[in-house]
Structure formats: structure tokens, C-alpha cells
């Protein structure tokens, strides 16, 4: 018999033993765990590259490396963090949590689920191997604009292209799986508007992935043929246009930034009601706001290109369309704050991360608004202000929510509690150092320091040194984070099934360490209603 | 299988085999492009492993389906999966159509001096902005990649083979729908007949497409003919690749119909392939209008 059914006893269909368990697994929790550890490994590698960048920028002048290697570091840091760390981490959270949250035993397409993970190490390996190739790794920035990535790039670029193909393949399969799971494996008594927000945000993110990733595949395919087969997509000599590359890239790239933040909104929308001990304020407006953001993300891409050259009417359109995104995002921030309003608040570690997410992500959102103003962007474009902006949304936004989610659901994943005292130390360490790291970069950018530059004028020296020191401290905070997580897995005190007093959601009705297959029989309407985080 | 039970497959080696196969294929491809001697052998090996994986994995799914291990919920999961997979394919083609429209409506006219481009006479002297013959016409000019530009002597026309191919593909959509109707009324011989007709039309399409490529190539239209040659061959090439996949999938379905794998109510694989075939059909209509016709 090649299949088993979930109605059998657990010990008939528990995990296999040994290493092959992880290679062969079709279990959503195993695959979620694989995704999370892979993402964490990539986070450390990408973080190590960032340490190299900050070390070179500690002082003006060229200290440690030649500029070409510096460019490789910034490029690979961006690619690894976006495609290797943040995206897989969210897919890992989705894998772990969505079947539990919708009352299902597993994902809808479990074998494909295995494949969408097991492509990743190969893609990541190919990407990292470019460091050791002749001519070095890609050095054209994570946005790989033509003709830097076509005419003037090293041979390793072709390996980079195939790595992106594989990563896209993995993301598309992951997204298809999540759509099929949410729409088809959801407990029959759970209506769409009963779904927890993490499920909603991931469902909408999946549509973004399926719409955007194939366009990225198209872009790198055009790069491949331009480089090797004599096509002229991005070559004006043959009637193509390097600017066209930017249009195609950002048609992918803008939805991509929402791919990396919508699930974060979902995570925060779980944690804040729990520790405010109040239902989420404005649930349906949260759903509609998420959908609106997703829709708008497809029609604003050229705000990344205000200085590239475009008719003024185009600039105006993309500016106003971008401003519109502030409305649904504002709705969300308002709802989170209203959820906390007059709540019985306590500040356990997940809540600290979630509250600081709201505050710091909003800073990143506001600097994004500033960048979206076409005339002002002429000053900000390609400066450290942009670097500060997207690190506020990606580090203190996306990554913050991933860490918050880790502390919030770690008891459910391991059946054990982490060390709350150490975790609080870690939080304050990280939240202070990250602001020392990124906040001065706003000033550097406004003063005109360009991004992706290994050396700088003396006037930028002080803020760069502050930023680098913050960077080293922030990097070191991950040593403590690693220790806290491993300590929890090994020595944590047993957790209860519902370790957070105010927590609601089907996942908390499962055993303290959730069983291998989450729900063997779908939960009842009463249970779904009583575990709903909104009224 | 009981309708109330969830379907959960055991562990599987196929995905990791697929990852290894595709990685070897792509690493081989990259090395082959860089002139490394073992590149093409690695490509063949990787391709073989990938095909082995597809046979093994899909064969296992077919067996489970025939053994009745799937319930309606699994069927629905497959349907969601296939339809969103096709949507992702649509978006892949959209990138290339986007490139076509951008070049046709914006970059080529701009390079030709539209919108008061005062630099055109100096910088772009000798640039032909005629669609299908877009490129520097000054002798000796190469692309940025160093490749010589091939200016086609004759233009591609929609009449003739492309029009014939449009009729063939549209007809194949009809015959496939007839096969589906026959399947729903459990008439296996008719299903086989209409499926064979569909596959024949598909193969004929591919044959004429090869002929059409031959004509175009003889007239000097190549991948290196500037943006029209690029979009022409990439769009029709990826489309032809998808038609080939579609023909292979239809052939598998034909064998499965002969073996009696499908019933009037339970034939997701047939429908999935039919959706795919219609998708390929629709892409062709876009190609016919925007690449060949206007």
C-alpha cells in the first residue's frame, strides 16, 4: 500500500526514522521545519555578507576588499536574503501553520510540497557556487539591470539565471499548494470569512507569487538568450531597450515586495489580539485591505524607475497609484492600534516583536511614501535613504514578523517553552542595534551618499561608523537567537497546549507539540467559531 | 476510498530525483554554453533523469488513481493545482508579449526618432525602425553581444502557413471537446477517434511550424535579427515547445483511454490535459494576431 489515511492511528503513520525521513517527507510539519532551517542558514550566510559590507564601510577608503568584490557582496546579500531567507521562511511558516489553522491534516499536494522545498538547496547551492567561479559572483545588484547583467557580466551570470529559474519554480509550486490547501482542505464548516488572517494573507500572497514569479522567469530567460543566443531584448542596437528590462523586472519586483510583507501582516494580526486579549479590530477591513494592496502592487512598478526616463504622464500616474497604497496600509496600522486600544496588554516576547513591528514597519512605510513622490525621488533615488527604507520594511518588517512568529508558535512546534528572560534580552539587543544600524542611513541618504559604493566622502564617516557598529551588534544578536531556539528545543520546560492566555485559533486546540498530522477529522462549526480571533 | 478520509501519501524519492535531474540539466546547459566539453553530456544525463522522474512520479499517481485511492477532494486539489499552474504559464507568456508590445509601441519608434528625439539623427543614424526589420542597417554593426545582425529580406506574413496553422489548432480544440463529450457519454471508440484526430492536428501544426521556420530562416529572419526576430522565435518557440508537451500529454491520455482508466464521471487527467491544450490554443491566437498579423 502506497498511501495511508489519516484516520489510522498515529503510530501507523508517524515520521520515518533517520535522515531519509527529511528527504522523502510529505508531511507539512517536516517540510515547514526544513524550510525554516534552510531559511535560517541562508539568513546567516546573507548576514555574514552584510557584515563584510559593513566592515568595509566602517571607515572611508578601501580597507578590506576591492570594489568588484564589494559589489558581489551587495548583490549576493540581496539575492540570498530575498530569495533564500525571507521567502522560504514565510513558506515554512505557511507550511507549518496553514493546515493547522484551517483544520486540515496536511497540505493538499504533499508530494509537490516536498519538491518545492527540495529544489531550494540545489538552487541555493548553484547561486552560492558563483562566488568560486572565474570572474566572481554576480556583481550587478540584486535587481540585475541590463546591460550590466547581459553585456558586462561574468560567465557565472548564467548559473545565477538558472538558480533564479529554480527558485521561481519552487515558489510557484509552493503557492499553488497553498491555494489548493486553503480552498480545498479547509474544514468544511469554515467559511472564507472565518479564516484567520495569516491564512488570508498567505492565500493572497500565493496569487501574487503565481502572477509575478513567471514574469521573473521570463525576464531571466530573455537575459539568457541576450547573453548567449544573440537576441536583442535589452539591446538598443537591435531595437530592444535596456529600460524594458527594468519594466519587466519591476513588474515582478513590486508584487515581490508585497510577497515578502503580506504574510508578515498576517502574523502580526495573530499576535496583537492574543496579547491585547481582545478580538482583532476590523477583521473584514483587514482582508479587503490585503486584497487591495495586492491588486495595487501590480500597477505601481515604475515608481522604482522615476529617474530611468519615462513620459511625465507616466511619472504622475505611477506616483499617484503608489500614494493609493498608503490607504489600505493605513487601515491595517489603524486596526492593529485599535486592537491594542484599552486591551489588557501584556508584553511577552512575541508581543514585543509585534508591537515594534508596527512601529518600525510604519517608519519604513512612511519613507516609502516619501520615495514614491516623483519630484522628491530625484533627490533620494539610489541613495542610502533607499537602503534605509527597504531595510526598515524588510528587516524590521518581514524579518521581525518571522522572529515574532518563531517565538509565538515555538511552543506549538516543539511542545516546549523558550527562556523568556533571555528572549527579552535578545529582543532589546536586536531592536536597539537594528535602529543604530539603519536609522543613520536615512541621514546619509538625505545628505547624498549613494548606495552600492565601497568608499565615500569624509562627511559621511561618522554616520557610517555608527551604522557599522549597530550592524555588528545586530549581527551578533543572532548568536543569542540561535542559542535560545536550540535551548528551547533541547531543554525547554514543557508547554501547555495553549501557552498564551489570550490565544485563539484552531492550532491551540491541538496537543502541546502538535501531532504529526494536524486534524484527522475536521473541526466542528462550534469549535471554529469559539476559536475565531474576530467576533 | 472512504469519502470521509483524507488522502495522505507516504514519503517519496521522486522529488529529490527531479531536483538532481533538473540541476544536472541546467548546470550542464550553462557549461555547454561556456564551451565546457562535458556540458552537453551532463545535459543529456540530467534530461534523462528528469524524464525518468516524470515517468516514475506520474506513473505512481496514475496507479494510485486507477486503484481508487483518490477521493473527490484529491480530484479537486488536482483541479486547483492544474488551473493555477496554467495561469502561471499564462504569466510567463505575458512577459514575452509585454516585451513585444513594448518594443513595437515604444522602444522602436523612440529609436526611430519619435517624440522629438533630437539625438536620433546623430546617434542612431542608419537605424531602421521598420517593424520586422528593426536594427542597425549600417554594414558591419553588431549587437552588444558581438553577434552580427541578420536583417530579413522578406517579411513574415499571416496568410499561408500561419493562417493554416490557426485553422488546425482551432479545429483541434473542437475535436478535443468532441472527445470529451464522447468520454462523458462513455463511448470509448469515439473518444479514441477524436483524440487521434486532435493529436494528428497537433502534429500537423508542429510540422507546418517547422516548415514556416525554414522559410523565415531562409529569408534571413533569425534570433539575431533584432527585437522582431527575438520575440518571433522566443514566442513561437516556447509556444511550439508547449504544443509538443501537449501532444505528448494527449498521447499518454490516448493510451490511458485505451486501457480504460477513465469513466464518465472521473477523468481529471483528461480534463487537465484538455485545459492545457486550450491554453496553448489561446496563446497561439495571440501569437497569430500580434506576431504574424498586425
Image (spheres, coloured by chain):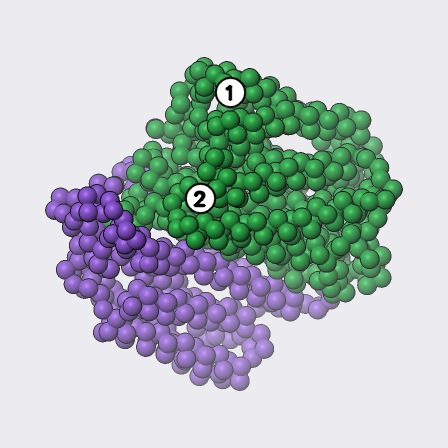
A246 with respect to B7 (left or right): left
Tint of chain A: green
Query: What is the quadrant of residue A200 in the picture?
Result: bottom right
Is residue A406 at least partly visible in the picture? no
Q: Residue at 74% across / 46% down in the picture? A: A336
Residue A300 point in image, percent of width and height = 51, 51
Q: On the rendered structure, is A148 left or right of B72?
A: left
Q: Please name whichever residue, B239 or B55, is drawn nearer the observer in this view of the structure.
A: B239
Q: Which subunit holds the residue at mark 1?
A: A
Dividing the image into 4 quarters, which one contains the C terminus of chain A?
bottom right
Q: Nearer the viewer, residue A27 or A496?
A: A496
The quadrant in which the N terminus of chain A is found is bottom right
Residue under label 2: A306
Tell me whether the residue at label 2 lies in contact with that at label 1, contact meaning CB atoms closer than 8 angstroms: no
Residue A375 placed where, x, y %? 48, 42
- The residues bearing labels 2 and 1 have C-alpha atoms spaced at a distance of 26 Å
Q: Residue at x 86, y 44 (%)?
A: A342
Please tell me in which quadrant of the rendered image residue A51 appears.
top right
Rendered location of residue A437, percent (x, y): 60, 25
- Residue A460: which numbered mark, if any? 1
Pick whichever of labels 2 and 1 is earlier in the sequence. Answer: 2
| Disc 2: host chain | A
Residue A394 vs residue A186, the one in the foreground: A394
User: Badge 1 local density, few (<14 within 10 Å), some, or many (20+)?
Assistant: some
Q: Residue at x 53, y 51 (%)?
A: A320
User: Image check: B285 left or right of B141?
Assistant: right
Residue at 72% x, 58% y is A284
- Residue A395, labelled with which disc? none
From where the camera sits, is residue A261 visible?
yes
Chain B tint in image:
purple
Image: A265 above or below A295? above
Amino acid at each position: 500500500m502506497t498511501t495511508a489515511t489519516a484516520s489510522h492511528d498515529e503510530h501507523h503513520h508517524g515520521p520515518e526514522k533517520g535522515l531519509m525521513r527529511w528527504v522523502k517527507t510529505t508531511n507539512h510539519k517536516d517540510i515547514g521545519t526544513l524550510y525554516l532551517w534552510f531559511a535560517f542558514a541562508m539568513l546567516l550566510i546573507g548576514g555574514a555578507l552584510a557584515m563584510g559590507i559593513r566592515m568595509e564601510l566602517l571607515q572611508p577608503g578601501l580597507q578590506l576588499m576591492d570594489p568588484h568584490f564589494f559589489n558581489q557582496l551587495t548583490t549576493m546579500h540581496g539575492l540570498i536574503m530575498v530569495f533564500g531567507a525571507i521567502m522560504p521562511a514565510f513558506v515554512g511558516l505557511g507550511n507549518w501553520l496553514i493546515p493547522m489553522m484551517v483544520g486540515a491534516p496536511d497540505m493538499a499536494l504533499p508530494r509537490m510540497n516536498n519538491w518545492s522545498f527540495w529544489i531550494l538547496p540545489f538552487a541555493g547551492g548553484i547561486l552560492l557556487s558563483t562566488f568560486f567561479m572565474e570572474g566572481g559572483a554576480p556583481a550587478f545588484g540584486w535587481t540585475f539591470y541590463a546591460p550590466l547583467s547581459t553585456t558586462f557580466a561574468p560567465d557565472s551570470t548564467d548559473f545565477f539565471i538558472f538558480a533564479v529559474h529554480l527558485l521561481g519554480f519552487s515558489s510557484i509550486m509552493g503557492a499553488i499548494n497553498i491555494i489548493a490547501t486553503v480552498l480545498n482542505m479547509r474544514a468544511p464548516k469554515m467559511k472564507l470569512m472565518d479564516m484567520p488572517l495569516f491564512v488570508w494573507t498567505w492565500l493572497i500572497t500565493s496569487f501574487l507569487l503565481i502572477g509575478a514569479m513567471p514574469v521573473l522567469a521570463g525576464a531571466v530567460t530573455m537575459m539568457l538568450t541576450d547573453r548567449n543566443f544573440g537576441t536583442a531584448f535589452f539591446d538598443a542596437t537591435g531595437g530592444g531597450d535596456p529600460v524594458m528590462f527594468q519594466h519587466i523586472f519591476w513588474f515582478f519586483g513590486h508584487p515581490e515586495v508585497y510577497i515578502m510583507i503580506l504574510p508578515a501582516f498576517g502574523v502580526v494580526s495573530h499576535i496583537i489580539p492574543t496579547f491585547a486579549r481582545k478580538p482583532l479590530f476590523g477583521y473584514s477591513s483587514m482582508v479587503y485591505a490585503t486584497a487591495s494592496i495586492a491588486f495595487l502592487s501590480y500597477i505601481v512598478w515604475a515608481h522604482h524607475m522615476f529617474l530611468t526616463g519615462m513620459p511625465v504622464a507616466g511619472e504622475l500616474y505611477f506616483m499617484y497609484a503608489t500614494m493609493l497604497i498608503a490607504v489600505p496600509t493605513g487601515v491595517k496600522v489603524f486596526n492593529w492600534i485599535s486592537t491594542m486600544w484599552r486591551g489588557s496588554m501584556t508584553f511577552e516576547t512575541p508581543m514585543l516583536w509585534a508591537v515594534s513591528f508596527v512601529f518600525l514597519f510604519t517608519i519604513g512605510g512612511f519613507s516609502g511614501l516619501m520615495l514614491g513622490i516623483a519630484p522628491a525621488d530625484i533627490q533620494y533615488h539610489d541613495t542610502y535613504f533607499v537602503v534605509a527604507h527597504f531595510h526598515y520594511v524588510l528587516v524590521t518588517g518581514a524579518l521581525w514578523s518571522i522572529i515574532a512568529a518563531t517565538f509565538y508558535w515555538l511552543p506549538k512546534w516543539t511542545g516546549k517553552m523558550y527562556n523568556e528572560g533571555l528572549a527579552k534580552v535578545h529582543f532589546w539587543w536586536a531592536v536597539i542595534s537594528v535602529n543604530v544600524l539603519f536609522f543613520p542611513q536615512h541621514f546619509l541618504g538625505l545628505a547624498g551618499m549613494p548606495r552600492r559604493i565601497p568608499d565615500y566622502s569624509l562627511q559621511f564617516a561618522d554616520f557610517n561608523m555608527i551604522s557599522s557598529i549597530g550592524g555588528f551588534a545586530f549581527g551578533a544578536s543572532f548568536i543569542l537567537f540561535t542559542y535560545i531556539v536550540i535551548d528551547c528545543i533541547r531543554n525547554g520546560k514543557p508547554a501547555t497546549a495553549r501557552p498564551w492566555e489570550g490565544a485563539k485559533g484552531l492550532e491551540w486546540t491541538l496537543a502541546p507539540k502538535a501531532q504529526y498530522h494536524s486534524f484527522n477529522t475536521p473541526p466542528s462549526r462550534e469549535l471554529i467559531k469559539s476559536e475565531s480571533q474576530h467576533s | 476510498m472512504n469519502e470521509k478520509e483524507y488522502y495522505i501519501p507516504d514519503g517519496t524519492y521522486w522529488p529529490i530525483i527531479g531536483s538532481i535531474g533538473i540541476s544536472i540539466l541546467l548546470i550542464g546547459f550553462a557549461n555547454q554554453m561556456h564551451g565546457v566539453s562535458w556540458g552537453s553530456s551532463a545535459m543529456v544525463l540530467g534530461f534523462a533523469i528528469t524524464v525518468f522522474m516524470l515517468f516514475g512520479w506520474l506513473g505512481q499517481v496514475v496507479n494510485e488513481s486507477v486503484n481508487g485511492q483518490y477521493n473527490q477532494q484529491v480530484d479537486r486539489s488536482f483541479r486547483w493545482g492544474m488551473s493555477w499552474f496554467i495561469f502561471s504559464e499564462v504569466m510567463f507568456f505575458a512577459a514575452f508579449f509585454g516585451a513585444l508590445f513594448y518594443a513595437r509601441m515604444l522602444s522602436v519608434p523612440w529609436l526611430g526618432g519619435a517624440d522629438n528625439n533630437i539625438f536620433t539623427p546623430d546617434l542612431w543614424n542608419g537605424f531602421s525602425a521598420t517593424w520586422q526589420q528593426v536594427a542597425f542597417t549600417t554594414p558591419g554593426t553588431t549587437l552588444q553581444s558581438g553577434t552580427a545582425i541578420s536583417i530579413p529580406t522578406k517579411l513574415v506574413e499571416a496568410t499561408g502557413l500561419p493562417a493554416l496553422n490557426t485553422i488546425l489548432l482551432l479545429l483541434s480544440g473542437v475535436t478535443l471537446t468532441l472527445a470529451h463529450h464522447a468520454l462523458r457519454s462513455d463511448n470509448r471508440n469515439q473518444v479514441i477517434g477524436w483524440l487521434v484526430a486532435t493529436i494528428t492536428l497537433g502534429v500537423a501544426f508542429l510540422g507546418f511550424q517547422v516548415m514556416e521556420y525554414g522559410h523565415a530562416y531562409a529569408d534571413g529572419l533569425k534570433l539575431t535579427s533584432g527585437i522582431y526576430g527575438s520575440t518571433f522565435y522566443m514566442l513561437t518557440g516556447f509556444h511550439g515547445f508547449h504544443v509538443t508537451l501537449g501532444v505528448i500529454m494527449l498521447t499518454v491520455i490516448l493510451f490511458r483511454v485505451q486501457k480504460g482508466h477513465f469513466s464518465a464521471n472521473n477523468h481529471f487527467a483528461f480534463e487537465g490535459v484538455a485545459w492545457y491544450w486550450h491554453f496553448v490554443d489561446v496563446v497561439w491566437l495571440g501569437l497569430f494576431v500580434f506576431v504574424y498579423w498586425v
